[in-house]
Structures are given as C-alpha cells and as structure tokens.
Image: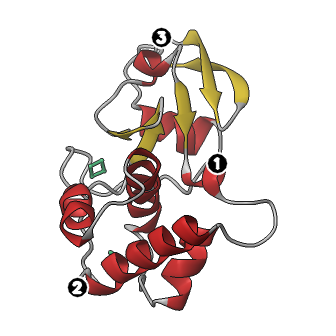
Amino acid sequence: MAVEQRIGLTLWVNGKEHLLEASPRWSLADVLRHQIGLTGTHVGCEQGVCGACTVLLDGQPTRSCLMFAIQAQGHEITTVEGVTPTEGLSPLQQSFQSHHALQCGFCTPGILLTAEALLADNPTADEEEIRAALSGNLCRCTGYQFIVDAVLAAREQRRDA
Ligand code: FES
Ligand code: FES
C-alpha cells in the first residue's frame, strides 16, 4: 500500500501558529478538525453548498471544505473557537441564545462567522443585507427568522456599545 505523502505546513489559526505534517490533498476543514482539534468547524456537504464549514480567512467568510490546507498558509484563519471568549459567550452568541436562533446547531458556527464578518464590514447592515449575507449558509432547522432577529439585535447592541 502506498504511503501518503505528508509535507510540513504552517497555519496561523485564532492567533496561534500551528506547525503540522499534512497531506497536500487534505482540505482546510479536515486539517482544522483532525490535526488541530478545532471541531467547531463543521463539515456537511463537502462541496461548497451548505456553508457549515465557513471560517474567516483574513476576515472574509471562506468555505474551508473547498480549500486545501496548504493554500491557507500565510493567511489568518479564524474559526468559531476564535470568536468565543474563554468564559461564556460572545455578544453575537448570546443573541443567538436569547433569540432561539439555533436548534441542532450544526449550521451555527458557519452562520456566526458569516454574521461576525458582515457586522465588522457593515455595522449598519439592514435585514435585507443580513439575509443576503447569510444566503450561503443553509439551516435545516430554524426557518431563518430567529437567526436574522439575533443578528439584528446584536447589531443594535454593538451600535449602543
Ligand atoms: S461542508 Fe463546506 S460548504 Fe458544505
Ligand atoms: S440549527 Fe440545525 S441546521 Fe441550523
């Protein structure tokens, strides 16, 4: 049986450098989950449709299932763990909790990161812009209204702060 080739890889994730040995054909999602242990990045369709695997690459929402880990070298990667405080929840996460914006939670990490990027880029995003930004993140449980409500409430909270 052929031995799979591994190469040295350096990834910068959630503000920390990770030196890894990985196959050049492994996706960023798989390396984050299985090499680094950041299992908050979920893998659903593995073909760029569902958005469950969304991470931020230099602040931009990115499908980590569609990218080889090797391509992410030299970029700043943020996973859901990177936007979660050591204790408790972030304001956006708290808003999801208080607005019942999640059920099974499978889509939630990707949606949180997409919403974080949106509010960072456009702090006054309206409902239409929030829906457009989240249109690439599929949720099979919630019907989206509560998710949109949660993002709108977090936007208000940021504005007041
Ligand atoms: S797992 Fe990446 S888009 Fe579905
Ligand atoms: S909460 Fe279940 S898929 Fe979104």
Q: Secondary structure at mark 1?
A: helix
User: Are dots 3 and 1 in contact, CB under 8 Å?
Assistant: no
Disc 3 crowd rating (10 Å Cα; few below 14, some 14-19, many 20+) is few
Q: Which mark is residue 143?
A: 2
Mark 2 Cβ inside 8 Å of ligand 2 = no
Residue type at tag 2: Gly
Q: Earlier in the sequence, mark 3 or mark 2?
A: 3
15 on left or right of 141: right
Residue type at tag 3: Gln
Q: Is residue 11 above or below residue 80?
A: above
Residue type at tag 1: Gly
Tell me if residue 23 can be seen.
no
Quarter of the figure that contains the N terminus: top left
> Mark 3 sits on what residue?
5
Mark 3 vs mark 1: in front: 1
Q: How has the structure been colored for display? A: secondary structure
9 on left or right of 15: left
Distance from the alpha carbon under mark 3 to that under mark 1:
30 Å
Picture coordinates of residue 101 (x, y %)? 41, 83
Q: Specify the quadrant of the image occupied by residue 42.
A: bottom left
Disc 2 crowd rating (10 Å Cα; few below 14, some 14-19, many 20+) is few
Tell me if residue 38 can be seen.
yes
> Mark 1 sits on what residue?
82
Q: Is residue 134 above or below residue 122?
A: below
Disc 1 crowd rating (10 Å Cα; few below 14, some 14-19, many 20+) is some
Distance from the alpha carbon under mark 3 to that under mark 2:
44 Å
Q: Earlier in the sequence, mark 1 or mark 2?
A: 1
Mark 3 vs mark 2: in front: 2
- Compare residues 132 and 106 and report the one nearer the observer: 132
